Image (cartoon, coloured by chain):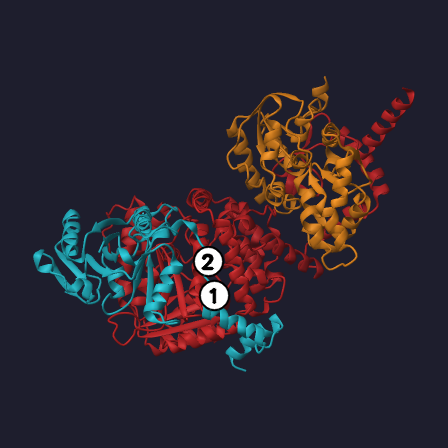
Amino acid sequence: MSAHPTTKRFIANATEALADPQLQRAMTNVRSGFIDKRAAVAAKLPEFEALRDSARDIKNHALAHLDLYLEKYEANVTAAGGHVHWARTAEEARKIILGICHDAGAKTVTKGKSMISEEIALNAALEAAGIVPVETDLGEYIIQLRDEAPSHIIAPAVHLNASQVESDFRRVHTHLDAGRDLSEPVQLLTEARQVLRSKFLAADVGITGANFLVAETGSSIIVTNEGNGDLTQTLPKTHIVIASLEKIVPTLEDVSQILRVLARSATGQEMSVYTTFSTGPRRAADLDGPENYHVVILDNGRSSMLGTAFQDMLRCIRCGACMNHCPVYHAVGGHAYGWVYPGPMGAVLTPTLLGVDKAGHLPNASTFCGRCESVCPVRIPLPKMMRHWREAEFERHLSPATMRSGIKFWAFFAKRPALYRFATSLMMNVMGWLGRDKGCFSSVPLASGWTDYRDFPAPQGGTFQSRYQAHRKSTQNNGRAA
Amino acid sequence: MRLAQDKAASRAPRVGLFVTCLVDLMRPSIGFAALKLLEQAGCKVEVPSQTCCGQPGYNSGDRATARDLAEQVIRSFSHCDYVVAPSGSCAGMIKAHYPELFADDPNLAPKAQALAGKTHELISFLVDVMKVKSVDASFDGAVTYHDSCSGLRELKIKNQPRQLLGSVNGLTMVEMNESEVCCGFGGTFAVKYGEISNSIVEKKTGNISESGAPTLLAGDLGCLLNMAGKLAREGKSIEVRHVAEVLAGMTDEPPIGAPRVSAQS
Amino acid sequence: MSAREEILSTIRRSLGVTGQEKPRLDTVTERLANAPRGLTVARGQLPHEGQVALFKEQAKATLASVVDVASYQDVPAAVADYLRQNNLPAQLRIGSDPRMADLDWGKTAIELSHGPSDGNDLAGLNHAFAGVAETGTLVMTASAENPTTINFLPDHALVVVSAKDITGDYETMWSNLRAQYGKGQMPRVVNWVTGPSRSGDIEQVILLGAHGPRRVHIMVVQD
């Protein structure tokens, strides 16, 4: 999917999503699954808001010194016996990873959840090279069986219901008893655990993402609840970490500050179950752990975001809180956004990675309700950056002609107050009179996007400014008479 | 600013009422309700020449138009002690976004800052600045209240309307679920992405109906038009009003989206 | 230009720096050397007894089970109790941590197997480096004495933590780790474990035992 974005079809995607009853039912889980839990756990920690400031400041500091921290990080990984590879583009990253897999003689690769892997379309590249990728995060595993992309950055299968998962498991796990009971979600979990256990033990290479890279120690960090990331990186001979370059934080203390807001913002847990700090390959005396440790650092356009209006986006720690709280995301789900990153963070990031000409709908499809920014653990001003994209589109004449002429028409009057008062007073009198019987219009020219779904309330008639002038005259006259 | 406050303390503050273009065009009675509430609170109110705050252009990426209109507002309202609007969205535009709009303009930046510093949404102005604790109004029945996004998140308006509504004789407050979730209006969003907007407002009208309150109030006319339009299309007989109308005791006008003729007959 | 050089030079161009500016270099060197603790979270700032109590309370909240054990000599009996209560065979996977391997296991009927787990163990026992009271988090460090596979493969992860190794917050734990391993040095893996494995990927309902242990049982040794 990442190779073939459908971001341009956003409106058609949204229409399909809104007409999909399974999806609409699944999306109702977002509220109970995320929103209430986040609110409760944030309320339990008096320092939560101050920690958000702290997390923001740490990320800003790291970005302002990104070149230097990347160099320190690389030196420390190398000192621990690991290898760092640099990839300018998705293609370079794929080539590096395929090379490592080839050297390892890999036939199967287990994978921890990684959005960067989605961004660079790694699974397709592995398959094309004859290597079998096995997604091990439960949600990722489910969507891999369905040949789908994740619809959420931390809950990839949030768009599905248990009954859909059951039918996928029956379709794929044909070696199991066809009469088995899978009516309870826990039975689905148990089955996935059994099926994936053998895959973990058989894999030649394990690939994980990274939530953070620590410059001080050369450590990569993954945060999971299932433990799949740890089995992925502990059991095979080779562990490959793929991470985009903005994941750098200076120290263990810094990352501890940020971890305090990550899980709370993401799943409403105080801390995720597994937070793993990995530094290099197996040591001389060790009895387990990977013999080879590689880190692939991906740029893919991010270095050019520094110093621009979009630099703040590089603070993102991929918690998903913005989409969990987004009314548009709730309505259409993640797939409608048409590429790897959905919701408000995707509406900002996708145009930088694909081009605003291809992803222009995303920053426009927002009410600017601001709920995303209000929950972002690193205080990214998401609506402001979506507005920057709208400005870029307007300047480059990418925004729709009807919208542009509508704004210009409105501005023509609004910039001429006397003409505006005259014209609007006339117009509102007419409209008020037309709407007096029903109180609403059921259709309005050029506004079918509104009136296809709801009525348009009729104006009272007259404008405030004209009525106010009349009101003042009459009170002044009364004043004089008295 | 300090000077303005000192002056304001010594005499009735001079408030420029920015009614917003939606109120100007669609529902003047909200403007009169605002006028009454401000005068009751001891303000000297004037209505400078005005059109639009520039937000539609600003949010559509048309920064040049937004700046032109913002400059117009700055010129018309700079002399006032305060600028007050019966809308969190338009007050938020002036307060939160004008400084950003002129950040690179050494001439206008201080003026935009100054205007931002003295601009307030109506209800929060009454409670937070004028220290109004109660109103002299009656309203018979239960109401539910929608927290409009800009007011709630840009201006932190949450308890102020509830506090004043609590002082209205005969009124009982019933909270709906998810009162802080967007109604799906979003200005041009409601037309450009009508189908998505509809899905959002449908959830909102569901929550409104479930509250059981026969009246819906909010502080922003854009949201009110959206919710009233959806309730009308759904055939629900919930009355929709701006909170200022109830607080001013000015509920003779038919509710938003209701017929005028039958109401008068 | 190599990918590395090109990426670093794009970053520098975007930031408007050369990478040679002394104040920037000093800032980075100082930050890495001093590792400032940042904002202090009050929750764990208690006398040590309170920290131990908080650790146990928080660990239970993550659905781990917690028992007090008076001394290391009592660990074998505590493990035997747990296995019996959960109808598990008297078998245990264990590393070579001298604090546990040298105990008198012969007093119990438990059959020990040593070394990393291959995925066929129902129960495994490791010793934690520390416990963090703030969130009831166990801190496990990888070594031959405490192989990482024992933390993840057995259905039942049993963990011994010494009460004296329990800290109020993560930052204090990191200072202790640096004191033991050296500044900038890390064990191959540090695993924070906060409760048993779980997943919410099916309809956002939390279920325990996704890929890692279904149960985490913590024995807090008091001496």
Comes first in the chain, label 1 or label 2? 1
Q: Secondary structure at mark 2?
A: helix
| Disc number for residue A258 | 2
Asked whether residue A405 is in view, the answer is no
User: What tint does the image give chain B?
Assistant: orange
Judged from this view, the residue extending furthest toward the right is: A481
Towards the viewer: C116 or B241: C116
User: What tint does the image give chain A?
Assistant: red
As drawn, is B135 to the left or to the right of A43? right
Which quadrant is the C terminus of chain A positioned in? top right
Callout 1, which amino acid? Val
Judged from this view, the residue extending furthest toward the front is: C47
Whether the residues at callouts 1 and 2 have beta carbons within 8 Å, the answer is yes
Towards the viewer: A448 or B152: B152
Depicted A348 relative to depicted A239: above or below: above
Percent x, y of residue B138: 64, 20
As drawn, is A323 to the left or to the right of C104? right
| Disc number for residue A249 | 1
Percent x, y of residue C80: 14, 53
